[in-house]
Image (cartoon, grey):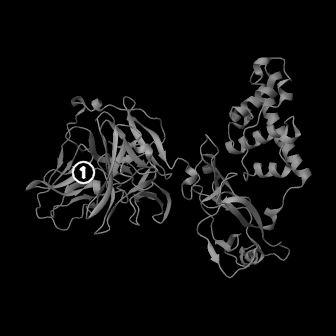
Amino acid sequence: MDTKIRSWFFFYVQLPLLFFSNSHLSTAAEFISPGQPLSGNQTISSKGGIFELGFFTPGNSQNYYIGIWYKQFPEYVVWVANREAPLSNKTSSVLRINQDGNLVLLNQLNRTVWSTNITSIASNSTTAELLDTGDLVLRDGSNSSDVIWQSFDYPTDTWLPKGRIGRNKITGERQRLASWKNSEDPAPGVFSVEMDPSGINQLVFMWNRSKIYWQSGVWNGQYFSSLPGMVAYQHTKITLVETQNRTYATYESLDNTTMTINVINPLGQLQRCAPVGSSQTWSCFWFMPTSRCEIYSYCSSFGICTQPLSTLASCSCLRGFEPASQKDWNSSIWSGGCKRRTPLQCSGNTSVDAEKDGFFVMRNMHLPGNQQSLTRVRSAKECELYCLNNCSCTAYAYDSSCSVWNGDLINLKQMSDGDVGGGDLYLRLAAIDLQVPSSEKSKGWVHWVIVGVGVGWKRNAEQLGDGESAFFPCWAAEKIVEDEVLALLDFRLGGIINIEELRRASRVACWCIQDNENDRPSMELVVQILEGVKDVSMPPIPWSIKILTDNSSWISS
């Protein structure tokens, strides 16, 4: 099997194990032995034909890896040997038993790129076998019950049934899940899941092996307290095993009628998946944390995460910043973060007439965690001056004590009204980025939005044919309420648009023409919405637009 495609988000369908019947068994070998290596298109299969091991290429990558996948669902790789050491050629690479008894992967130059690396193997007649659990084991040839090494002790991004996430109390060795970097690179990404390093019996989700951003809750004897979904389905039992030497979590299927696995995806969520039979795709139906805004640094540098109810999380740049890659952001790829539109005065913008930097206040923010606390600063003004006089200072906050942030700001979240624990963050900006449009300019901006969308309506009306264009205002308002804003776009643009900007502009335009003046946003709020600083809710259809038409079929109920 060569190309594998990683898919992360689907719906849930159960799969009976009857799909793994004898009619699907492979003719591939079951073992790798001293005289039977593996190379090229060769594979080995587990005894029951459930799992297969061989060389594969992820997505459109040109690299090769040794991996394990479900034989009937080969697009989903559950374990990778050389995830940090890709191969350029599978034909001249070989997986074999070395003279010292270790299982080794050699590249085209006959150099070792991966090994089981066991130092005390008594026999050089070891064999590698793939089990029906998906565990690759290295056995002593003289005693087949003696397992010298097993892949379950070295998971990649997938937690298989009977697999383990744990820690060795004696050696400190850990079994952790580590995400792929992306769908074409299985090298360890920045997200991982492991047992709490502090010794508490809970799973922790970590960013960059250093920052805990989510916790499973403590084991209560049946499940982890914040992960009830892991036992919500009667087919699964999760267990915490604690011995003198190690502690680990494992799970299993109780009735052998449903298969599920748990994967830490490149976005930082643990997702539970099951295969869908005839289509040979995977279905992922449970995610933790449920909100992507809980994932550390989801929007990267100078990005802010928002997730309105019933919608996916999205990122926007802070005031005075823009996407580092507009193309990526248009595709909802937020990892590149944002960059400044204008350099700060002390970082190159040093002309004589240059105005001084200032601060833009962001209310009710979840403050970043990498702050520097200044205990000797006694007032908000002193805190502001300290930041202003320090070129590396990008923001400050003051609430009975002074906190400053140097360098990039990450993990920013706008808290909702009523949330506790938020604070005001003062963001340092160049003077030009602090200027607020005048009232008249703001009105013109709103008029531009309304007219611009209206032009799109009129031009698109031409595509509907005679008799329908007269009802376009009501039709367009309905499209906004139904969140089908792409229908409003001028067809001559060919669909090239930032969908979030179009959604904000369309909604704020509809709010600005509400019949009740009290429902219309202020100019300051309009500017903040259009810049992505504030969220905008779904507007109702103005009654004045409804009564423009005598055709009741165009009137929203």
Horizontal and vertical percent position of residue 426: 73, 66
Instruction: Classify the position of the C terminus by image quarter.
Output: top right
Horizontal arrangement in the rendering, residue 501 relative to residue 256 (left or right): right
- Tell me: residue 120, above or below residue 224: below
User: Is 412 positioned to the left or the right of 198 in the image?
Assistant: right
Q: Which residue is mark 1?
A: 136
Tell me if 242 is positioned left or right of 58 in this view: left
Q: Total label count? A: 1
Q: Residue furthest right?
A: 440
In this picture, residue 404 sits left or right of residue 476: left
| On screen, residue 396 above or below 21 | below
Residue in the image at 28% along x and 69% along y: 170
Which quadrant of the structure image shows residue 386?
Answer: bottom right
Between 29 and 51, the one lying in front of the other is 51
Which quadrant would residue 450 be assigned to in this image? top right
SS of the residue at dot 1?
strand
Q: Position of residue 245 (x, y in %)?
A: 26, 64
**Number of other residues with Cα within 10 Å of mark 1, as a class: few under 14, some 14 to 19, many 20 or more:** many
Three-letter residue code for mark 1: Leu
- Most extreme residue toward the left is 142
Q: What residue lies at 24% left-to-right and 30% top-to-bottom?
A: 21
Q: Position of residue 265 (x, y in %)?
A: 46, 50
Residue 97 locus on image (x, y percent): 18, 57
Judged from this view, the residue extending furthest toward the bottom is 376
Query: Is residue 5 in view?
Result: no
* Quarter the N terminus occupies: top left
Residue 469 in sight in this render: yes
